[in-house]
Amino acid sequence: METGGYAASESSPPSSKWPSNAEGYTLLSRIGHGAFATVYKAKVVSGPQADSDVAVKVIELEEFADSSLEEIRRELQMMKMCRHENVIAYHVAFPTKRQMWLVMPLLEGGSCAYVMRATGGSMGFEDESVIAYILREVAKAVKYFHDNMQIHRDLKAGNILLSLDARVFLSDFGVAAPLRDDKKRQTFVGTPCWMAPEVLEQTHGYDYKADIWSYGITGIELATGEAPYQRMHPLKVMKIIIEKEPPKANRKLSHLFLDLIEMCLQKDPKKRPTMEEVCARNAKFFRTADAEPLKKLLSRLPPLDQRIPPLPKAREEKVEEKPPREQWEAWKKL
C-alpha cells in the first residue's frame, strides 16, 4: 500500500490523551491512499490534544476477507511495539462502523514517491547526496526490523515518508511478518516490481534477505523515478525477475552507488549482504549523504493535499463478509 503524509516520532505509544472515537476528529483533506485505505489530514476536536493536526489512516474493513483481517491486526501490533527514530508508530487505533482508524502525527513532506511525482520525477531525485541520505536512514529502519526478527516485505519509495525538515520514516507494516531463525516465510505478498526472485519462485521460502533485494530496487527507484519494469504487466515482471539478470539503473550513477545496488541485487540470496554489512561496506557512499538539498526541495513544494494523485479505481469485486465479533474485541484491546 502506498501512503501519503503520515508518520510518527521515535516513541509514540497509544495514549488515552488522544480521542479513541471518530467524533474526536475532523477529517480535513485526503493526503494518501492505497487499495483498501485512505489517509487524511485531520484535526483533533476534543481532549488534551484538541486543535492538534494529525494524520488518520482509515482502513475499510469490508474490503477484507476474514483471512486478511489478521494482517491489519498484525500491522497495529507491530506499530505499537516499534521504538525507532526511523520507524512509524501511532497515537491510537480504534474500530468505528466498518472501518479501522489509525491516528498518527502528521508529516507534511509525504512519501518519497509523491515527492518525486510532484517534482516531475521522471529521473527521480537528481542529487545523489539526497538519495544517499534517504537510503542511509531507511537502512537504519530495516536493520532495526531484522535485529528484531522481522521482515518488512514491502520496501519501496511509496512507503518511505518525509517530514518537512527531511526526517525519514519507514511505514506500512501490513505485510511484514515475524521471522524466526529456523523458519523461512512462504507467503506470497508485496509489490511485484520490488520482489526478490526467491519470493516470486515460491520454492524454498525466503528470509530477511528479500528485504535487501527490495532495498536495492528502491535505490534504483529513487534515482530514476520508478522501479524497473514498473510499466509492465505484473505477470511479465515476475517472469523477467525470475529468469533474467538483475536490473540496472537507466541513469549514470557514481560507482559508489552502483556498488551498493549491485551487492543488494544478487539473485542468490546467500550472496546478498545483511543490512549491517550494507551499512559497513557502503560507509563511503553514506558519508556523501546530505539532507539540506532535500529540505530545500520540500520547502518549495505545494501543500501535501494539493499534490496527491487521484484515487485509484474502485475494485470491481468486494468481499461482503463482516468481520467476526471476536476480531472487534481483539482490536479494542490494542
Image (spheres, grey):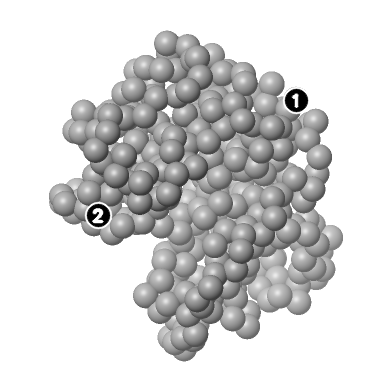
1 lies left or right of 33: left
Relative to the observer, which residue lies in front, 274 or 255? 255
- Residue that carries the numbered disc 1 in the rendered image: 296
Residue pictured at 47% horizontal, 11% vertical: 254
Which mark identifies residue 229? Answer: none
Q: Label 2 sits on what residue type?
A: Arg
Q: Do the residues labelled 1 and 2 touch (CB within 8 Å)?
A: no
In this rendering, is residue 185 above or below 21?
above
**Secondary structure beneath disc 1?**
helix
In depth, the one of 42 and 214 nearer the eye is 214
Label 2, secondary structure: give it: loop
Q: Position of residue 92 (x, y in %)?
A: 61, 65
Q: Residue at x 62, y 60 (%)?
A: 312
Q: How crowded is mark 2: few (under 14 residues within 10 Å), some or many (20 or more)?
A: some
The residue wearing badge 2 is 185
Amino acid type for the residue under numbered disc 1: Lys
> In the image, what residue occupies the spot 81% across and 40% down?
302
* Label 1 packing within 10 angstroms: few (<14), some (14-19), many (20+): few
